[in-house]
Amino acid sequence: MSLSTQPYKGARDFYPEDKRLQKYMFSTLRKVVESYGYQEYDAPILESFELYAAKTGDEIVNEQLYSFEDKGGRRVAIRPEMTPSVSRMVAARRQELSYPLRLYSIPNLWRYERPQRGRLREHWQLNVDLFGVDGVEGDAEIIQIADAILKGFGASPSMYKIRVNSRRAMHELLEAKGYTGAIVTKVIALFDRLGKPSFDKFLDENFASEDRGKLNDFITNVPGTAILETTAGKKVTELVSILANVGITVEPDITLNRGFEYYDDIVFEVFDTDPENNRSMFGGGRYNGLVGLFGVDPLPTVGFGMGDVTLQGFLEVHNLIPRLVPETDAIAILIGNVYSQAQPALRQLRKSGVNIALDTSGRKLDSQIRSAVKSGTRYALFIGEQELESNSFKLRDLEKGEEKQLSLDEIASTLSVPHRNN
Amino acid sequence: MSLSTQPYKGARDFYPEDKRLQKYMFSTLRKVVESYGYQEYDAPILESFELYAAKTGDEIVNEQLYSFEDKGGRRVAIRPEMTPSVSRMVAARRQELSYPLRLYSIPNLWRYERPQRGRLREHWQLNVDLFGVDGVEGDAEIIQIADAILKGFGASPSMYKIRVNSRRAMHELLEAKGYTGAIVTKVIALFDRLGKPSFDKFLDENFASEDRGKLNDFITNVPGTAILETTAGKKVTELVSILANVGITVEPDITLNRGFEYYDDIVFEVFDTDPENNRSMFGGGRYNGLVGLFGVDPLPTVGFGMGDVTLQGFLEVHNLIPRLVPETDAIAILIGNVYSQAQPALRQLRKSGVNIALDTSGRKLDSQIRSAVKSGTRYALFIGEQELESNSFKLRDLEKGEEKQLSLDEIASTLSVPHRNN
């Protein structure tokens, strides 16, 4: 029986044309976040199970975490998110690091779930985190970067909406209405379902029948701006104004509630406004309590994560993916038995920055040309004895069907212009 | 109890200074292999267990593979090597792809083993594979690239040695001596141990006492060039000559035997010549039989893998790591309450390609300057009301302790010179 050629369910193979798009997306992400002074880090894809048990959230840990025992009896997990890892790393060097500390990474993450549009079992996710800034300028910077990334891909402000909320303000608001203790988390979860089909079911299953009417009234009638009236909401007002000053509109939205338990103050989400893709794309918030869980002094932190599948969906829906060119500029085709003699010419071209493959298949010329066309490479360069003697080579543009007779130097300057994606 | 800040055993955290070195190594690798016309691909880090059961080798599959059952009852493995994945991907599009096909990747790989110098549980490994070239020019290209990579890092030919062998020639040679059938694999494994402490033990445990003397004599006395006398060895002679023509010396070595079962003709290894690090660094070979295991037409294939831990060890021992600079060019320090007014200046600098962080901690000036120095960033830029009005800013070189008074345009041209590592 032969082996299957399928990748693992819910995971993707990246052939060169797919990888090219990923490289374009990642290099754009890197360019924007580095321009704000963020530096790249990484951590192992395997972590101890305990790292997620603490704060990642029950649904993920119980149902979606890839975890197993290693051969030494240690319980390990494939990371479902990066925030616990970066918090661990910062805690490990809490004293040596200098603050404000700006870190980013583009890790590969895994969750066991039913693959569906925009959600796979694995994805890559940009993580941007700012450590050591307690003021709302920190939250503003993180949202500014999220906005700059979308603009960096050519998006216009009408293509997306940014909404903010404050967990602390929510708690204040609910307390004023008499909701305290264990019920608060449930009421917040109910807010999150407003306007969704699951609202009624959640209401029925989680609250006593005598409370339902009052809750329903409160939640459906409270204005999105109600949080601004609270003490914690003053920070939201300040945030809205700071961002308005740099040309970014954000809307307070009381129904916005990020999934992770560790968020403890302002949270935000970015929504796609396209009718075909009208959904939350990504978000983040403040999690001042996480680094302290590792037994070191707490550290104010704010950050966000942006997945590659969602980002690609956004770029596709809004026609923002540019034409991407292969890494290979040209394929050299030999005329006659000049394999050895052609080597110095190839070396010279590569040294001048040309990415050139050599067809060493030994097939007929026609068949080599057909392969070159099929490969999607833009140019074919013909090298024979006469060409090497006269330093005059035929360079064929396989896309336009044009040919030019050029010296090696001329070929180098034609092909080595900076046109690649990364 | 607080959470541990340690990464999983045998795996590495990459803080920005570590990631910087990795980025330098990876971008050098990419540059060299792309210059030979190779294009980047990727595959999921989780694969089906069966993919490795076939040909990866018993020791790895039984003792070193990270494998487990997923929540759907599928047996999966974290990839210990990339060759099975790329073979799977090529087989899946056997007809659509154009040949010769040149692919590379830098995947993260895992093996459960006792962490030791130069060997961790996880590493990153450049994989370079050429599909569709049956002739020895294919083997030559792969070795040429391995050589070009080391030279690309600034290595001189005296720092390393390249050795080649031929599995087919070995079989011929052994057959001529009367070794056929199941014993061949064992004799080859014994050759691999020549000069190593494990030789005698392996001889005792795997061969009848009456055979041992003859085998010992044969193995210790056969010259490294013996393979050249065989029919399959003609290809080795041709390879040696092709590589000599491009200035690369390779030595035939009958004791060289790569671990993977799928190699079926010429194999090679690159050794560090430094007395402190005298070891095999990496290698590869021809594996014409692998793609066909997926139920498609067989495809001649030759490739190699090079791990990041070994590469870094080589660069360190030979002093080949250049000074690497942080992604962040400067830290902006505000004088007075000019947070809003400073935004357009920061935007302009970022737009001109300057990577600049803003200290939003609100601490005293002294303390901000100390943090900037500690962070390793080269420049500090001071922004106050007066500076913004006159477009004349103080830029302090934190390394040299020098200061200059510059306009925004002058700062941009001072800082945005191409000096980063990737």
Image: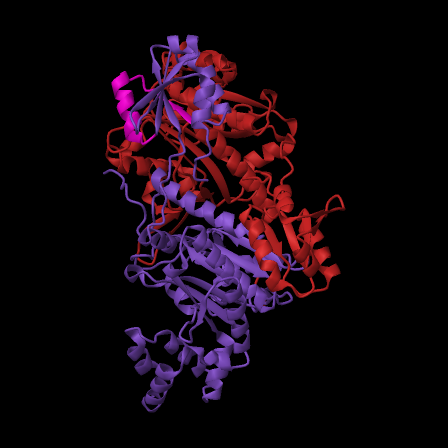
Chain colours: A red, B purple
Q: Between residues B143 and A79, which one lies in front from this camera angle?
A: B143
**Image quarter hosting the N terminus of chain A:** bottom right
In the image, residue A214 above or below residue B161: above
| Residue that appears at 68% across and 46% down | A378
In the image, residue A159 above or below residue B393: below
Residue B196: percent from left, percent from top = 30, 73
Q: Is residue B113 visible?
A: yes
| Residue that appears at 53% across and 67% down | B286
Q: Between residues A38 and A293, which one lies in front from this camera angle?
A: A38
The boundaries of the magenta stretch are B355-377
Q: Is residue B367 magenta?
A: yes
Residue A275: percent from left, percent from top = 65, 27
Residue A188: percent from left, percent from top = 43, 24
Q: Between residues A256 and A390, which one lies in front from this camera angle?
A: A390
Residue B351: percent from left, percent from top = 51, 24
Residue A181 lies left or right of residue B86; in this view the side is left
Quarter where residue B280 is shown: bottom left
**Image quarter hosting the C terminus of chain A:** top right
Q: Is residue B365 magenta?
A: yes
